[in-house]
Amino acid sequence: MSLRTTSLGELVIAIPGSTALFHKYHLDFCCGGKHTLEEMAAKRHLDIEQLETELQQLTQQESSEENWRNAPLADVIKHIIDRYHNVHRQQLPDLIMMAEKVERVHGAKPDCPRGLASTLQAVWQHLSDHMMKEERVLFPMIEQGMGAHAGNPIAVMEFEHNEAGEQLEIIKSLTNNLTPPDGACTTWRALYSGTDQFIKDLMQHIHLENNLLFPRALRGE
């Protein structure tokens, strides 16, 4: 396999541990998962040979990560709901509460992420509606063997994934890429740490759907 001409989505599926590497270099493997490593490296002005070297090193490491490529689609769906949908439902209300507190207490400071609470609230509303549609409509279709006929709902879900990706970029711009300023209080630091984990989880969630679940379902598996 030529690493540089392989899509990020395929690399994440094929090479356990590559998600951490892509987070390190700010490479979008979920919404941008259809782009090749070479294309994304050029976009980010990264050293393609260095990326290839680090990916090659990952292929030589043993990993205990679950291989969802060959798992039954019902198991993949259960994992997505348990590990991502239900976790997001816990993460976002807490993050919104912390963001409101930080803006209320530190709003006069130049580094305060003003607008973060409302942005997280918009993400929560968008994601709640999105996950409900998946759980009530799309996932049951796939589990009943009708994935090959689910092209339209899958296209809608992928469009909403792209919208979520745009919201994540707004969050990063409001928070200096989730870097707390010197002297930030405990709540401020916890807010950025929790938001960073949420973003990583959401990217992995979208990756599993866009690059693994949806293509397999459309093939009629």
Image (cartoon, grey):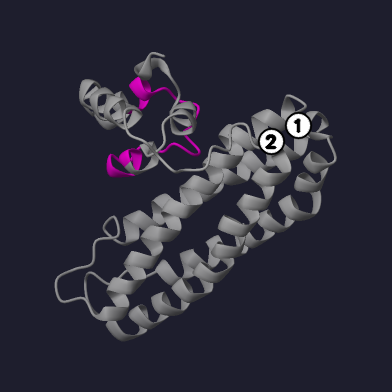
* Badge 1: residue crowd in 10 Å (few <14, some 14–19, many ≥20): some
Where disc 2 sits, the SS reads: helix
Where disc 1 sits, the SS reads: helix
In this view, the residue in front, 192 or 22, is 22
Confirm whether residue 67 shows in the render: yes
Decide: is 159 above or below 80: above
In this view, the residue in front, 145 or 30, is 145
The quadrant of the image that shows the N terminus is: top left
At 24% from the left edge and 61% from the top edge, which residue is drawn? 179
At 40% from the left edge and 50% from the top edge, which residue is drawn? 169
At 46% from the left edge and 28% from the top edge, which residue is drawn? 14
Instruction: Measuring from the top left, give residue 142's x and y in whole percent.
Output: 78, 39
Decide: is 35 above or below 213: above
The quarter holding residue 153 reads: top right
Question: Residue 25 magenta-drawn?
Answer: yes
Is the stretch drawn in magenta largely helix, strand or loop?
loop
Q: Is residue 152 left or right of residue 66?
A: right
The quadrant of the image that shows the C terminus is: top right
The kind of residue on which mark 2 rests is Ala
Decide: is 107 above or below 44: below
Q: Is residue 145 left or right of residue 123?
A: right
The quarter holding residue 195 reads: bottom left
Instruction: Measuring from the top left, give residue 198's x and y in whole percent.
Output: 45, 59
Marks 2/1 in contact by CB < 8 Å: the verdict is yes
The quarter holding residue 57 reads: top left
Q: Say which residue label 1 marks.
A: 151
Range of residues picked out in magenta: 21-40
Question: Residue 1 magenta-drawn?
Answer: no
Q: Say which residue label 2 marks.
A: 155
Q: Which label was assigned to residue 217?
A: none
Confirm whether residue 107 shows in the render: no
Instruction: Measuring from the top left, give residue 17's x and y in whole percent.
Output: 37, 39
